[in-house]
Amino acid sequence: MSTDELLKQIIPLAKYEYREGFSNHKIVDTLNEIERADIESKLINLLQSSKEVDNLIVDTLAYMKSKNSLVTLKSLIKKQLPVIETLSIACAIYEIDNDESMIDLAIKNFEKITDNYTIMASFYYLFKFNNDRLDNIIKKFLNHEDYLVSYNAKRFIDLRTSQINKD
Amino acid sequence: MWTETATSYYTNDPNEIAAFFQQMGIGQNNGDPQDKEKKDQKKEEKTKDKEKDQVPWWQRKVGDPKDHEITQKDIDEFWADNQNLAAIMGLVGLLTPVPGDEFGFAFYSGKGAKEAAKASGMKVLSDTKAAERLAKLTANMEYKYGSASWTMWGRLSKALANMVPKGSEIKVFLTEEAKNNMQSIWNVWERPTLEARNVKITIIPVK
């Protein structure tokens, strides 16, 4: 399969029918060295050329631990973006480069969120940092008045607990 | 005053000249066919806009980029309209109980899961009118985790999950990756809502 075809499988169209429940980890894991390098470069180009930031591309580069994407990610994070996108980029930079300044940036951006739906969605990125300060922020929502917010906060805290118990 | 000559009428009176042109429909730029065309076009656009305001967005013809524009009013209308149970379900008897205390409706998530649910005779979210309308509403929006489109699909899914009777049983068709996907609508919106209603969830794995 050509890398262009692989890319279409890794980053499907940003539509409900293609993206809901989708994960590309399995496909990424099967890439050989040459394919991986090619896909990485194509993902970086996509990120640079797109008008909007696609957090699936950002998450994929983070999953690939792509050091080559850091320059692009660090330039994107300076832009005025929706909070969820800023969080995805901050999380990716942290995962790839262990840049601790991203923790403060994530907290600062999370504090800007005013609606419950975005708060709920943000937990995913806060959790991915695997950092106590950010886990403690999620914990603050365990008794939130909105059932979905508190349920999702609990879901991530439970997941962390099971990860710790596993280790 | 009009003066008749051998071949034509003649007048110097500006009012009469203006009245003549007006009568002929060629006064005040009306004489230029291009101007007339522009005026007609504007008139047509105004009528179209007026019609557009009266036609709900989901019934509008799609083609012109303007038709894809989604305003806050559209979104508000969508939720107001879909608060009604019948509108959400869209299909008669979608939640009619079938023997075995199950329902003819299933949830799904992941590639091929919808097809698997439908192949086993279940109705799914996309069979509802609300989903059809939401698909149009979000046609030009990017579906990304945490985006407006994701939130809207999540809200609709939650509304649907809220309609499953408390204490009942429901099937969910899930791929392995969707089951473990922390960003999926199933995990973020549907499952919590069903659990809050003490609905017994039977997972049907999809390969």
Image: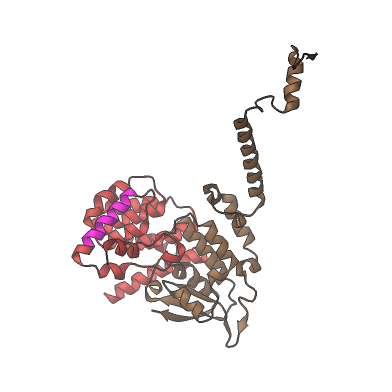
Chain colours: A red, B brown
Hey, which residue is sitting farthest front in the picture? B6
Q: Left or right of B111: which side holds B24?
A: right
Whether residue A15 sits left or right of residue A44 in the image: it is: right
Q: x%, y% of residue B135? A: 52, 61
Q: Position of residue A14 (x, y in %)?
A: 42, 59
Question: Percent x, y for residue B173?
Answer: 46, 77
Classify B102 as above or below A53: below
Q: Is residue B9 magenta?
A: no
Left or right: where does residue B175 sit relative to residue A35?
Answer: right
* Viewer-nearest residue: A38 or B143: A38
Residue B21 image-quadrant placement: top right
**Depth check, front residue: B207 or A80:** B207
Image quarter hosting the N terminus of chain A? bottom left
Most frequent secondary structure within the magenta stretch: helix
Nearer to me, B188 or A70: A70
Given residues A23 and A80, the one toward you in this image is A23
The span shown in magenta is: A36-49
Q: Is residue A40 magenta?
A: yes
Give the mark count: 0
The residue sitting at 72% across, 28% down in the picture is: B25
User: Would you place residue B36 above or below residue B151 in this image?
Assistant: above
Q: Residue at x 57, y 54 (%)?
A: B75
Question: In the shown orientation, is residue A150 left or right of residue B128?
Answer: left
Q: Which residue corresponds to the image point at 34% horizontal and 65% vertical from the top-left?
A: A9
Q: Position of residue B86 (x, y in %)?
A: 65, 69
Whether residue A28 is visible here, answered yes or no, is yes
Residue extending farthest top: B12
